[in-house]
Amino acid sequence: MNKKMKKAFIAVPLSVSLLIPTFSVADAHGHESHSKGQMSAEVTNPAIDLRASLDTLLSEHAFLAVVAMQKGIDGKEDFEAAAGQLNQNTEALSKAVASVYGEEAGAQFKEIWSSHIGYFVDYVTATAENNEEGRKQALAELDEYRMTQADFLDKATEGRLKAKDLEEGLKVHVDQLVWAFESYRTGDYDKAYDNITEAMNHMFMTGKGLSWAITDQFPEKFENKSVDTPAADLRADLNSVFSTHAALAALTMQKGIDGAKDFEAAAAELNENTEDITAAVESVYGAEGAAQFKEIWSSHIGYFVDYVTATAENNEEGKQQAIKELDEYRAEQAAFLDTATEGRLKAADLEEGLKVHVDQLLAAFNSYTSKDYPTAYKNISEAYGHMFGVGQAMSGAIVDQFPEKFAGEKPSEMPKTGMGGMSQTNNDAVMWSFFGFLLAALTGAMVLRKKASNN
């Protein structure tokens, strides 16, 4: 791996195309700025789909990087598989860049991006060897990486993303991963898992900033749509909490079967994620609906724990019982969401989607316990990506149910976020203040409908 990215930057071609995995996105070229006007209340269009695609890849990178660092310092057998999946993520990101800016730019991005993964590996290796000089060298190289990556993106986006802002955002990313690793290494597991969640969430701001730059650079190929709308933010927020659930569930199940010291912290972070999802539900459907949702949602986490426990005890009957309860959960959760969305999400379709979620997590766990680690991490990646479909479907139903709450004036330019320079605290504040804005109107609507049905 070349650790010193010294060569000159290439010119970005003006005629490009975009084809990102998971979501279908339009071709892109042109230079016109977005025009002002009324934005439609929609959660899917070429621009918003681009944002979701980048969110998927970037946030998964953060998760896999943390997992690989944990596995590396612990000398776990699945380290190579975790690192391999992280490399697959890099391949997907590089192809996305190439589809926008050309093959040469994609190759250059890959070289730069791969370098910072290598520096994290160097940091872990030096830590394992008690090599303080090696640790400092890795951090110095990560600083060099930040400047190189920021310069590349500044030039690629023709100054829409500023190098200075990008360097700051990339520092947040690097620091979060280092903090998560150091907290894990020193046994401060609660802080380690807080940092994991924050690192993943931070990348959603990165995806927003990068997708804004691309759609502003090539507006005609994205139907002159904006990535920065209330409906798009709702989809991104739901994507974030649902995908975090899948990531934490898969990792917690691994920690459980391994009897790891950080199992309780991982489980606690998974429960915090449940609280986040519940808060989102409450902001739309009220406290009563949220309480019902939380009870149902929490049950399926408990059934996964039952499955892990039964596996550890070689209790086949217990495993089958847990699977049966997960089937019952699917039906109950599907019925709740069908009712809450007034039929916009159909119970039969929801049950099938929830089956995919359950099956993916069980397949990932079973592959892990049978030491088929590449398959395990492939399943984890699929489970992670699947939840972005859940976020799209859920946000689409909510926006369709309450369209007036998601209309407004299109902003003339993207807020100054760089590649995620906004802190997680501010990000959460934006998310929950937005949901809070909806709460009074939406809860009132639910109350009126309940009164009408009672009459």
Image (tube, rainbow, N blue to C red):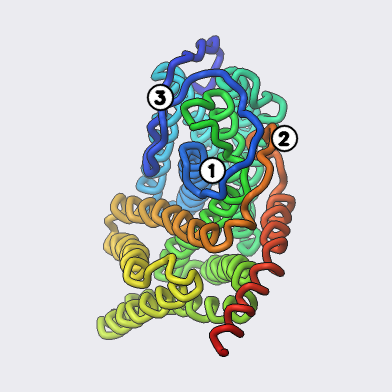
Query: At x 49% / y 69%, what residue is drawn?
Result: 341
Q: Nearer the viewer, residue 7 or 415?
A: 415
| CA separation in Å, label 3 and label 2 | 26 Å
- Residue located beneath label 1 in the image: 124
Query: At x 46% / y 37%, what residue is drawn?
Result: 46
Graded by Cα atoms within 10 Å as few (under 14), some (14 to 19) or many (20 or more), the crowding at tag 2 reads few
Query: At x 43% / y 70%, what residue is drawn?
Result: 343
Mark 3 or mark 2: name the one nearer the start of the chain.
3
Q: Quadrant of the N terminus?
A: top left
Residue 44 image label: none
Q: Secondary structure at mark 1?
A: helix
Is 49 rendered above or below residue 15?
A: below
Mark 1 or mark 2: name the one nearer the start of the chain.
1
Q: Determine whether label 3 and label 2 are within 8 Å by CB.
A: no
Is 317 rendered above or below residue 110?
A: below
Amino acid type assigned to the residue bearing label 3 in the image: Ser
- Residue located beneath label 3 in the image: 17
The answer to which quarter of the image holds residue 316 is bottom left
| CA separation in Å, label 1 and label 3 | 38 Å
Q: Nearer the viewer, residue 439 or 162?
A: 439
Graded by Cα atoms within 10 Å as few (under 14), some (14 to 19) or many (20 or more), the crowding at tag 3 reads many
Mark in front: 1 vs 3: 3
Amino acid type assigned to the residue bearing label 2 in the image: Lys
**Residue 358 seen from this side:** no
Amino acid type assigned to the residue bearing label 1 in the image: Val
